[in-house]
Each structure stands twice: as C-alpha cells, then as structure tokens.
Image (tube, rainbow, N blue to C red):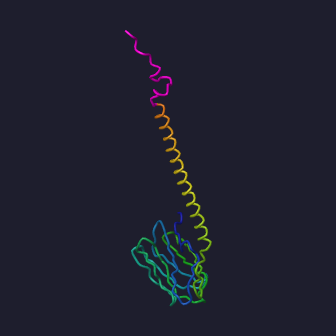
Amino acid sequence: MAVTLEVSVGKNHLVMALNGSEVQLPCIFTTCIGFKDLDFTWYYNSTEVIYRGNIKNKASEPTMLYADPRVRLIGTTTGRENNISISIFVDFDNAGKYTCHVKNPKEMNAEHNATIILKVVQEMVPVDNTLTRIIVGTVGGLVGLLILILIIKKIVLLILKKSQEKKKECLVSSSGIDNTENGLAGSKAEQKAPPKA
C-alpha cells in the first residue's frame, strides 16, 4: 500500500518574528485515503513537545492533548484544508526549529513531518529592494524603448507608403495630360487636315 500522507509548512521555511509578539507557524497535512484517530505533535528543536493533539475524523475538530501555555491551535480540519497551524508568543529564547509531525493510523501508522525555522528579532529590518528596483527599471526602460522603436518604424513606413502613393499619382496624372500644344507625337498638330472636295 502506497503512503499518501504529506505534511507542509508552506514554501517559506524561515519565519521572522518580533521579540514579544505572537507569530503563526503554518502546518497543513494531506492524505488521499482520509484519516481516523490522527495524532499530530509540534516539537521545538526536535525534542521538546509544545503541542499535541488528536483528530477523530474529517467531521471533528482537533482535540488538545497537551499545550505549552504560550501555544494555541489556530487551524481547523473541518474545512477544505487539514490545517493544524499554531500560534505562539515568542521572545529571543524561542528562536529555533519547529517541527509539525503527523501520524495517521488509517495509513498503517504512516508518519510525516515538516520543519520551520523561527528567527526572533528586536525590530523588523525593512527589505532593501534597490536591486529589484534597478532590474525592474532597466527591464521597463528596455521594453519602453523597444515599443518606441516599433512605433517610430511604423510611422516611417506609413510616411514612405504615402510618399510612394503620391509619386504614383503624379506619374499617372502627368501621362494623361493632353499634349496638343507641345507638338508632341499624338498632338492635334500632327493630325491630317480634312481632304478638300
């Protein structure tokens, strides 16, 4: 039987939190065949249990078996996602690894886990977006220049086309002028006089 249990803490495995603040640590589990009497545990630095719970089935909410006083469950399992995320009040001593571990008896006691690293800081440092702005500005400038070149090319081609059309009109109209006064071939001067009777 193939094990289908998966546990995820999202794409970002590093969470930054301010000293003295409350931070959410996400955890979602998926299983193709469902679950019954599923156990989940949150560990701090791989050994210390900070939250333990059980979920009877998809129709029931998680039951807390143990919780550190600073930790509370904020997830729910009766909706679309099997969310067993927690919220924790942190100080500098709480920085470290937090592991969400799930065991599903319905899948022959399959187990899976995922880890998040929590970094606690005195103040949030604004992200320096200078390089990003330079790249976006350069790319935007190049795209703008390319568009401008294409517009200029279109205008030049339009002007050349109009100019060629005017030359053609001049040639057509000048070839149709009556050359009677110029004595040129085909003029009236060359026509024979009517025969005398």
Residue 36 at x, y percent in the picture: 45, 73
Residue 93 at x, y percent in the picture: 60, 89
| 95 vs 16, nearest the viewer | 16
Residue 166 at x, y percent in the picture: 49, 41
Q: Which residue sits furthest left?
A: 197
Q: Main secondary structure of the magenta part?
A: loop
Q: How many marks?
A: 0
| 138 vs 113, nearest the viewer | 138
| 77 vs 91, nearest the viewer | 91
Q: Residue at x 56, y 84 (%)?
A: 17
Vertically, is 149 above or below 18?
above
Q: Residue at x 54, y 78 (%)?
A: 100
Vertically, is 197 above or below 4?
above
Membership of 16 in magenta stretch: no
Q: Which residues are magenta?
A: 176-197
Q: Residue at x 49, y 28 (%)?
A: 182
Give the quarter of the figure containing the C terminus: top left
Q: Which residue sits furthest right?
A: 131
| 160 vs 14, nearest the viewer | 160
Q: Residue at x 54, y 85 (%)?
A: 50
Membership of 182 in magenta stretch: yes
Residue 6 at x, y percent in the picture: 53, 69
